Amino acid sequence: MHERTQAYLRGRFGDHYRNKSLTPPPEANEREWGYVPWTDGPGETYSRHNAMIDLGNLDDFLARERPKHVYFSAGRYDDPGVTTMSEKGWRSSDLIFDLDADHLPATTPDDSYAEMLETCKDALLRLLDFLESDFGFEELQIVFSGSRGYHVHVRDATIQHLDSDARREIVDYVRGIGLEFDELLDEETVAGLGRKTPAENRYLPTEGGWGRRIHQRLLEILGDVRDMPEEEALERLQEYEGIGEGRAQAAYNLTQDRFVEIERGNLSAHAVFAQLARQFATEVVAEENAPIDEPVSTDTNRLIRLPGSLHGGSGLAVTRIPRDNIETFDPLVDAVPETFTNHDISIAVTDGGTVELAGDSFTLEEGVHTVPEYVGVFLMTRGRAEKGQE
């Protein structure tokens, strides 16, 4: 990055912060703070082990230092400003989840930036289903990271004092790691006429957890099978491993005559039902787990981006998202800082291509262009352009 480009970005980040007042996290004085200043050369200087008292008033600090990135710790400490973790005196930590579009198995190198972020939003919604429905967490803050994904801060009192091992159990659950199908099942003793001993019926839970997700997949697929012509339904069922003509016929008959047992999750209705459920479980875990960055969630000392700050690798704002607004939130529109929307600037593009921002699409070849400032800031922070002469 040329000196002129760096000076321009630092100045405009400062202009942004001078016109914004950021809300610090709860117990801000007990947290460690870190930031990355604009520095010469290819590397970055990371200043951490700062206490709020070292920075001073947050708004004044941001306007004065105009940092490239700003972070605070998930952890709270007796003395957050000391330089060794063992001497900080850990008190408690939020539980942090990080979803990064670059690391999602559902994204491909051919996906556009907008497509990657949309895929990441789908993963975010799955994660929230786990956190809210399965764990019952209520104090959640949802944040667009400013670049490639989303963060979720869990601040419920129940998780504040969990150590890394306990947090790993939560991680394993939302990732579906080590999930044992048989452990998901409920059992019910049934005493019937003519039986010498009571029978044990096995059920998939239909109300919550991974059992609910697997049961929903069963209902979807077997509901479709129920409505197909018999010949087509039998062919469909035989696509599954271990389902021959006889078992396919039995499964089809079950959908016609005893679908209520499928709705109840009764795997004892027929052996083929349990066989299909076990296969669907593998599919459901692969497709419906939340592909979080695991080390972020297990680390009680993790630093995470400050909501409201600017991301020095995109020029976009790290943006809080109200829970009810997630579906309609568009990061490439809603996270564009107003500071950069008022005028055009000249840039020298070094890595051409298409940029989608603020509802518009810009295709730029290498060379000098006049573009809206938010496009120029995005390309300069990405290392794809330098500041041009005005």
Image: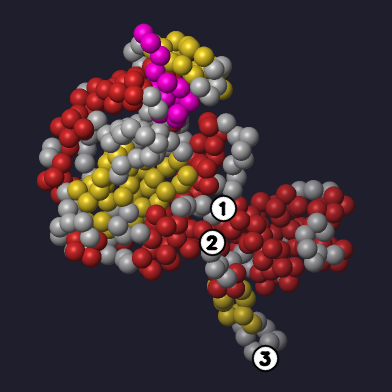
* Residue closer to the observer: 36 or 115: 36
Q: Residues within 10 Å of mark 3 (few under 14, many from 20)?
A: few
Q: Which residue is mark 1?
A: 288
Number of callouts: 3
Label 1 to label 2: alpha-carbon separation: 9 Å
Q: Residues within 10 Å of mark 2 (few under 14, many from 20)?
A: some
Is label 2 or label 3 in front? 2
Label 3 to label 1: alpha-carbon separation: 43 Å
Q: Residues within 10 Å of mark 1 (few under 14, many from 20)?
A: some
Determine the secondary structure under disc 3. Answer: loop
Q: Which residue is mark 2?
A: 176
Q: Earlier in the sequence, mark 3 or mark 1?
A: 3
Instruction: Please state if 380 lies on the left or on the right of 67 as rendered.
Output: right
Residue in view at x 62 percent, y 40 percent = 108
- Region of the chain picked out in magenta, as a range: 377-390
Measured as percent of width and height from the top left, residue 47 is found at: 26, 45
